[in-house]
Amino acid sequence: MITSRKLYKEYLDKDRHALGMSNLNFLQKLRLIVVANYIYKFQKLLRKVEYVGNTKTTKWGDMRYYFLRFRYKRLSLRLGFTIPENVFGPGLSIAHYGTIIVNQNARIGKNCRIHACVNIGASGGSSKAPQLGDNIYIAPGAKIYGDIVLANNIAIGANAVVNKSFDEEHILVAGNPAKKIKEIDIKRIIKHV
């Protein structure tokens, strides 16, 4: 959770690095000005909404928060993302546009790479949502739901349905229902770790 300006800048830095935008040359920076990167714009706005929402103490802070939140919701609809505040840790990398739905009670650690058509939610009317560790790779179409916990350094395969906890690290889970497929080195999948 972003509770200070220093932490806000740290989150932005790690998100930029996760998206591969930390060491850009002049031409690449110029290209970003001409052709907007809407995913990075979305992530910057997400972090700003989190920062302002968590640190507001005055009426001006409330007004600024609601204005930023309005812009954030509008961009969310445009990109197909339903991602609430204070869910993802630093180093978030959204790979593509497309439907991504995350429950507000879910918690995902640092360095998460998430693809399109992913759903992370509660199950059966319960308010308890998944708790995912650090360095998680979520492939396209994965569904993660229920009162479950996933350890650090786990890759979730495409179209996997994860509805039980996995406490072993450095594994690939896939299938419906998900099961351990093999051991992996997460640094080969998430390059910025």
Image (cartoon, rainbow, N blue to C red):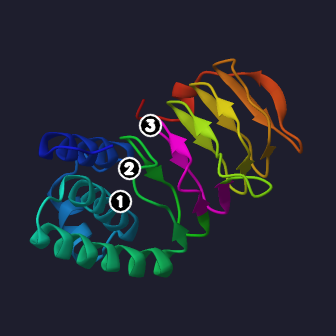
Q: Say which amino acid is labelled 1.
A: Gln
The residue wearing badge 3 is: 111
> Mark 1–mark 3 contact, CB under 8 Å?
no
Instruction: Report the Cα–Cα distance between label 1 and label 3.
Output: 13 Å
Residue 172 to residue 127: above or below: above
> Mark 3–mark 2 contact, CB under 8 Å?
no
The residue wearing badge 2 is: 19
| Foreground: disc 1 or disc 2 | 1
> In which quadrant will I find the C terminus?
top left
The residue wearing badge 1 is: 43
| Foreground: disc 3 or disc 2 | 3
In this picture, which residue range is highlighted in magenta? 101-120
Magenta segment includes 104: yes
Instruction: Report the Cα–Cα distance between label 1 and label 2.
Output: 10 Å
Residue 34, image x, y percentages: 24, 77
Residue 15 to residue 79: above or below: above
Q: Say which amino acid is labelled 3.
A: Asn
Q: Secondary structure at mark 2?
A: loop
